[in-house]
Image (cartoon, rainbow, N blue to C red):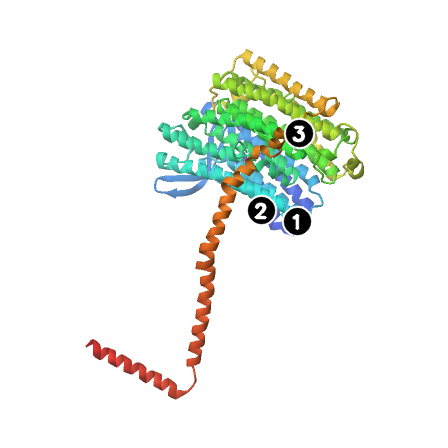
Amino acid sequence: MVWGAWICLLSPLAAAGLITLGGARLSRRAAGYTATLSCFVAFGGALASFIGLLGREGSQRQLVSTAWTWISGGSYRSGLEVMIDPLSVFMMLIVSGVGALIVGYSIGYMDGDGEERRYFAYMSLFVFSMLLLVQGGNLLLLLAGWGMVGLSSYLLIGFWHDRPSAIAAAKKAFVMNAIGDATMALAFFLLIEKGHSLEFGILGGQFSSTVANLVALGLLGGAVAKSAQLPLQTWLPDAMEGPTPVSALIHAATMVTAGVYLIVRTHTIFEQAPKVADLAAGLGAATLLVAGLIALVQVDIKRVIAYSTMSQIGYMFLGTGLGAYANGMFHLMTHAFFKALLFMAAGIVIHALAAEQDMRKMGGLRRLMPRTYLAFLIGSLALVGIFPFSGFFSKDSILASAMAHGAYGYLLWVVGLAGTFLTGLYTFRMLFLVFWGEPSAFVREHFHALQRDVVGVSMASTVGVLAVLAVIGGWLQWAPLWHPVETWLQTVAEPTVSPKNWQEAVSSALALALGLAGIGVAWLVYGARRVAVPRFALAQRILEHKFYFDEAYDVLFYAPAVFLAGLLRRGVEQPLIADTGRDLADDTRDLGRIVARAQTGLLRTYALAIASSVAVLAVVFVAVK
């Protein structure tokens, strides 16, 4: 079991090293197979850890394996250690399993790209970083993985570095995530000062309310930034500049879910800071509503899916913030299935249309790409939460938990229900625009079918596996009839809220009805085209500008920073450093010319200089006496 965890962690790192060191000696296709194989090996290690835990009960399901003491100073110790418990194994299976499918899909999607080796080295590094984050046996290793995930995402988002937009998106993602990294580091400093440790167990200690709130706020800042929740969400849509498999990996199963994992892993400190936990739930509810509204006006197919990711992560924050930890993690799992499916099916569409992503140029693809349409339809139904697809089982249980939380929970429950209507509307708006109707002139001119070769097999087969998981994955748990996920995770995070059966039934019925209503409205407007889209110019402008978050940040932070930088350059750097350097160089050169003129080469001149010097010294010594 312990060896399985280490294999799971280290195999993607080994692949990244092998691809990097192999260089041009390793063919581009071989690099893809190496990265894919390493992820499947990691999944095998995670599966071995899972099987090993099945035979254990209670506290025996938590093991820590230490390779060596990493940092030692005074009474402080931090080891290079992995934790094997139900929560880490749950995440290991998702990250390595879905990650393996996405990396395998990339073999086809990236075929022909001149930088395939670099791409697969980055992907392997990203998977390793995410596994380090979820397997780290202490908060310091978690922070190391957290930072490496940010670095890896920067490299992958900016993979096509010849595009200025990709570089700008990568820098934006890095900076926004660095804000969360800083708040987490401050929380850890406070833990070291008050608890003298960064072991997970220290979070269960009794801290004063002030310390508990500050630590929880610091952790929440990191979670909000990494999971693209309000107000640090602006980086996620721009991250679509990366290749589509990168979007699937970052925005489906791994990076953006790290914040949800963090809250569940550190739930004991959030339970000591209930107001901060409520804030996390409230931010999730606000994000799911804002992201759903913005998705209604997007025309880029990947951006619609990206905003749906923000919205679904909002549901997870809502659940975990209220104490429904297993429900939030269950939705994390099903979301990984259907969101990766949607991104990868969209990738096939983009591949078939010469890299075009504007939905206004699409249409009629249902007849040209029936299998892709079926996969996209399955992913869409699961995203909306239609029975019997996976989203129905996971999202509705979060709504029921909100309903059971009291007055504040009822408010979040209403917001969550509104989000289900928006999800149905924007998801099927996308599906109808892309697949229904007659093929557009652009489609007729640029469409080319996916060839049935190695490329086609790698893309189609992985999409097929995810389609099956999106259909059956939700049946793993159906509250209150059976709940193995909750049973599995309760030894790590015991839920603090328990909805009643009637709350489960009411939430499911209303969510299903509102989801179907959203689909119906989308069909009337975009499918059958029986209803014209109403024009609200002000609302349209606000949504197209994404509630002006980017503009506000430009005014509040970017513009003042640029002004200050320019002021310091003109007032400090130029006169004191640049100009001083030139003046010093000129003075040194002039002094050298003067000295050079004194070097005449005449013996009598040198004798006179020496005699004059001796005379001066004699006068000085006589005067001193």
Q: Residue furthest top?
A: 502
The amino acid on which the numbered mark 2 sits, given as a three-letter code, is: Gly
Mark 3 Cα-neighbour bin, 10 Å: few <14, some 14–19, many ≥20: many
Report which quarter residue 577 is drawn in: bottom left
Q: Position of residue 106 (x, y in %)?
A: 67, 39
Q: Position of residue 604 (x, y in %)?
A: 38, 88
**CA–CA distance in space, label 2 to label 1:** 12 Å
Query: Nearest the camera: 157 or 88?
Result: 157
The answer to whether mark 1 and mark 3 are in CB contact below 8 A is no
Query: Nearest the camera: 623 or 28?
Result: 623
Identify residue for label 2.
17
Which type of secondary structure does the marked residue at label 2 adopt? helix
Identify residue for label 3.
466
Report which quarter residue 241 is drawn in: top right
**CA–CA distance in space, label 1 to label 3:** 30 Å
Above or below residue 597? Residue 240 is above
Q: Residue at x 38, y 36 (%)?
A: 190
The answer to whether mark 2 and mark 1 are in CB contact below 8 A is no
The answer to whether mark 3 and mark 2 are in CB contact below 8 A is no
Mark 1 Cα-neighbour bin, 10 Å: few <14, some 14–19, many ≥20: some
Answer with left or right where residue 467 lies relative to residue 330.
right
Q: Is residue 51 visible?
A: no
Above or below residue 454? Residue 371 is above
The dot on residue 26 is: 1
Q: Residue at x 52, y 44 (%)?
A: 559
Answer with left or right where residue 360 lies relative to residue 153.
right
Q: Earlier in the sequence, mark 1 or mark 3?
A: 1
